[in-house]
Image (cartoon, rainbow, N blue to C red):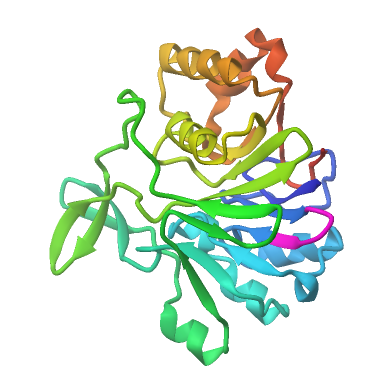
Amino acid sequence: MKLLTIMDDKPSEHLGLYHEHGLSFYVDTGSEKLLFDFGSGSHTVANAEKLDVPFKDISFAIGSHGHYDHAGGYSACVDAGLRCPLVTGKGFFTEKYAIDDVCATYLGNGFDLKYLTEHQIRHLECDGMLKLSEDAYVLNAFARSYDFETIPERFVLRHNGEWVQDNFTDEICLVIKLAGGVFVIVGCSHPGILNILTSVEKRFQMPILGVAGGTHLMEASDERIRRTLTIMEGFGISVIGFNHCSGDRLRSIVGEYPKLHAVYLGAGDSLFL
């Protein structure tokens, strides 16, 4: 399996690429080519062209959740030739905001189901688990196994004219079966990275070999970060490719856990497994 970071907040050694707040991965399993998230805008396409990502050959495009930094670049990808089915969780198109007192900031994806219809793009919705191929699955409906993995109250939905707490029930992860276990790819892990991994382990009954993506630990205390990493070590995970919303404190603290073989995946960085 090849995992390539098309877009991230930080650069890699490839300084000819854009980096900005957002996330996009290209995944080649050997049998399927997948696009996981789309960054926040057209710079994702510019990077993909420089990295020789074949949009026209991609089997499935996967939107981890309906925030702009993961879905805002989708229309630019379509303009560049992406026509495969779009896979999301239920609620992906609900209006999403961050609220601070009376100030509300729209964080949604910038397109709707009508856009997909107009471009003749098939929409697949995950409700629990959805099989994409023999070695690729998407998963949601994560059990809340760790109560310390809380969601900031500022994330809300606008529903029937009312503000509702966003519990990110739309968030999905991608699970790739490899020899000896599974590899998990996450967007922002708003439901909690440990809640996600525990749900994957219970569903697949296979070792988790590694995980890549945003862990949303940028606002977490050092205590929570260390507790999270200790539990991840207990899963037997040997590779972590963290980025995006994971935060600089995680980047510093993870060095205390050499068994995890943690690396930062900036724009242009890859993992081969």
Is 168 placed above or below 242 here? below
Question: Which residue is found at the position 50% from the left and 13% from the top?
Answer: 226
The reply to whether the magenta stretch includes residue 33 is yes
Is 225 placed above or below 213 here? above
Q: Give the image quarter of residue 59.
A: bottom right
Judging depth in this view, the residue of 160 and 102 nearest the camera is: 160
Residue farthest toward the top in the current orientation of the protein: 256
The reply to whether the magenta stretch includes residue 209 is no
Question: Which residue is found at the position 60% from the left and 16% from the top?
Answer: 233
Q: Is 15 situated left or right of 79 in this image?
A: right
Judging depth in this view, the residue of 173 and 63 nearest the camera is: 173
Question: Which residue is found at the position 83% from the left and 52% from the top?
Answer: 16
Is 3 placed above or below 161 here? above
Give coordinates of residue 215: x percent, y percent: 52, 34
Give coordinates of residue 220: x percent, y percent: 41, 23
Quarter containing the C terminus? top right
Give coordinates of residue 197: x percent, y percent: 51, 33
Magenta residues span 29-34
Question: Which residue is found at the position 16% from the left and 46% from the top?
Answer: 101
Q: Main secondary structure of the magenta part?
A: loop
Give coordinates of residue 95: x percent, y percent: 31, 65
